[in-house]
Amino acid sequence: MKKSRSTLIARRSLLKGAAATTATLLIGKPAVAQSKKEILIGNIDAYSGPAAVYSSLGRVPGAYFKMINEQGGVNGRMIKYITYDDGYSPPKTVEQARKLVEGDEIDVLFGPLGAPTNSAIMKYMNAKKIPQIFIQSGATKFGDHKNFPWTMGFMPCYQIEGRAFAQHLLATQPDAKIGIVYQNDDFGRDVLKGFKDRLGAKTSMIVAEISYETSEPTIDSQVVRCKSAGANVFMSMTTPKFAAQGIKKIAELGWQPTHYIGSNASSAGSTLKAAGFDLCKGIISSAYMKDPVDASWVDDPAVKTWREFLSKYDPGADRNDIYAATGYLVSQVMIQVLKQCGDDMSHDNIMKQAANLKDVENGLLLPGVKINTSPTDYYPIEQLQLVRFNGERYEPFGDLIDGGMSKG
């Protein structure tokens, strides 16, 4: 049935009016941005795969932002938090990043996990000019403000930790024979570089330097090779699953080396508990925040507040999971950035404020540790403390180490 000429004319007029209205809205884009009542925060974590032990880093922020929303949001805006699983697989990370940026149209990619995974999306995020901030990794490359101005890490740089371990080793065992097992990615290679840099001319102390892939089932053979090489020091530059395997294998072999484990895998509540506390006495690591498993912090106000938060907003969370505490801490820093943004939640301003944090303190950080960034300093935390496990908890020793990555 044909429509009348008058009906067609009326419809054309209606469409023209709608188009004109749309054009007006587009022209008035700043006004639309000002009236936006939602902040879209994206996240990518490993809820499956070899790094699933870190899943609370992605889950806890959702609970924290829910609490913030119940309190009225940030500067009158509610937070919408979207988190996807990449299984710690870089190709999957690329897929999820595109989904967040092009599909969900996020304002910021916050707290994504891992060195290899975030390395896979750095160029993309910078090309899109979307903040990729507070990455849960200490890879040095995530502080490269000149080449990747939209990318920023969070935790202390792995190279700082490698240097600290080498410095301690040179002072206590200058004639050591060192066996190293490291993850064959940016994380493992970064710790290794810092360690070797500090050893300097004494890299000949290394008698075994063996990598592994995250796809491998165990590192048992690598540990055996370190022992067979005559090492009396074992450096574990691994993720939690493999760190726990290393502890067990060392015990099985009856080997008693001085044992260093990177902070990303040293949690008493996950790695050491999984291996067995009785096998972990004497292990040396580093820390920048309070470990909720450590009995010395049981009555600490900030730790108690964190536990109360979990009870209300994430009751299924493990109260002994340091990564749940880390997720809480970094969420608080994200809220600080958003508060500093005021009414301007543009990509540019979010990145600007992330690079403008001045002596930010937090109750979950170890005493003396502060968060600082600037347009030329993309390393938020540059201090750490060496710690030694006494069979029940970690005990700090020595002075607070200031890595000063931003100073070169």
Image: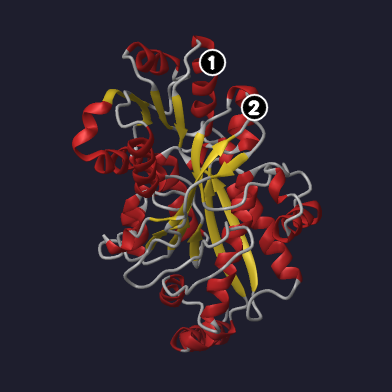
Is 327 in front, or is 246?
246
The answer to which of marks 1 and 2 sits earlier in the sequence is 1
State which quarter of the image contains the N terminus. bottom right
Work out whether 97 lies above or below 223. below
Pointer 1 residue:
251
The image quarter in which residue 267 lies: top right
Residue visible at 43% across and 65% down in the picture:
131
Residue visible at 67% across and 43% down in the picture:
294
The amino acid type found where label 1 is placed reads Ala
| Residue 265 at x, y percent in the picture | 51, 37
Give residue 277's mark. Answer: 2
Work out whether 388 lies above or below 312. above
The local secondary structure at tag 2 comes to helix
| Residue 326 at x, y percent in the picture | 59, 52
Q: Residue furthest left?
A: 201
| Residue 335 at x, y percent in the picture | 59, 69
